[in-house]
Amino acid sequence: MDPEVSQRKIVKLRERVGFAIEYAFFNALLQCFKWAPLKASYWLAEKILATLYCVVPKLRRRVEENINICFGECYTDKEKQDLYARFLKYHAWFWVDMLIGPHLIQKDAAEGNLDLSEALKILDETSKNSDTGVLLVSSHQGSPDLITLALGTRGFSLAAIARKLDNPFIRQKIANERKSFPRIELPKNGGLRPAFRHLSRNGLVGLQIDQDAGPNGLFVPYFGKLASTHSGAGMLAALADCPVVMMFAIRTAPRKFSYKLFAEKLDPPADLGDTDANVLAWTKVMTESVERMARRYPEQVLWPHRRWKTRPPQTQENPDRSHDARPASRTSLQIPRFR
């Protein structure tokens, strides 16, 4: 056998074994959280996460660095330490809710711990005044997965753009857990065209914009520092000419499945007569809304994300010049032809 072919088979086998081990741990946690009392599940998640952050110190350093970037000038050292401690708990509870969210939402129908009143009112008013669907933009704060799951149970035709998980076993398990929820899953790569079609049919499209987008992202200010931001939401808003509603699922009580969906309809930025400029303007407005909610509930932000991983060219380092920003490696956005 060709040594190169043999090596590829070995690598593939190791990958599948790794996926199987990950899935075994994932499924064990899923079953534990699903059948144990909810408060016990939250307590167990707290212990697991605290251990993880002790064993992997770079995670703690990353969280502390991000908190310092955002609040270093307005928080004392004690306040930053308190925020880190609260973040650990909220982050642990988030993982429980993410894993068994469908089960908890179905149970919530009887207990009423998910407040959708504000979001439903704004969505209803926005939909009535629009000839297209509505673009829902959120961030990794609170429990974003609950937004599309909860709205799907209220009869909305909803599509969600998200990155496909690498582990095929976990990906299939999560799909099975959510199969009773009417939600269309669109891939992160290549999902803009079907999203545009869904909006043209008066559907809802949901996506998140607060992760590092690499050198091809749009650099817009986030907590006073330019951050590479995905342009997909801005493209859909500018080209589909649809209303944009920022939406966040924020926990309202500790160690309890209790959330409120906060919604904010964004006013469209002025038409700058250029598609690239309009996409950038929309991206900036959306990011400003994400920052406002992060300042309001900082303990619920997913701080381990390397939000400022990609740095802009020297000519763009000053956030005050963000209106001149362009993707780092090209002079014009690659706008897909939707129609």
Image (spheres, rainbow, N blue to C red):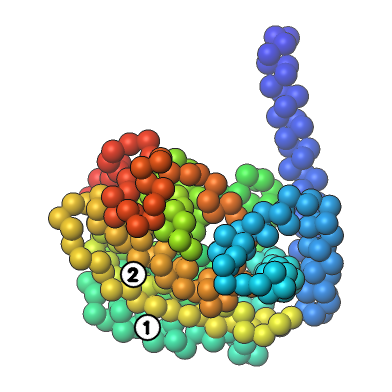
Residue 263 place in picture, x, y as percent: 43, 79
Numbered disc 1: secondary structure: helix
Residue 174 place in picture, x, y as percent: 64, 58
Which of the 4 image quadrants contains residue 299? bottom right
Of 2 and 207, which appears nearest the observer? 207
Question: Residue at position x 48%, y 63% from top?
Answer: 223
In the image, residue 333 sits, relative to residue 258, either above or below, namely above
Category of crowding for the residue at label 2, using alpha-carbon neighbours closer than 10 angstroms: few (below 14), some (14–19), many (at least 20): many
Residue under circle 2? 244
Q: Is residue 233 left or right of residue 213?
A: left
**Is residue 338 visible from the viewing direction of this image?**
no
Residue 99 place in picture, x, y as percent: 69, 65
Residue under circle 1? 122
Question: Residue at position x 26%, y 69% from top?
Answer: 268
Q: In the image, what residue type sits under mark 1?
A: Ile
Q: Is residue 276 left or right of residue 261?
A: left
Category of crowding for the residue at label 1, using alpha-carbon neighbours closer than 10 angstroms: few (below 14), some (14–19), many (at least 20): some
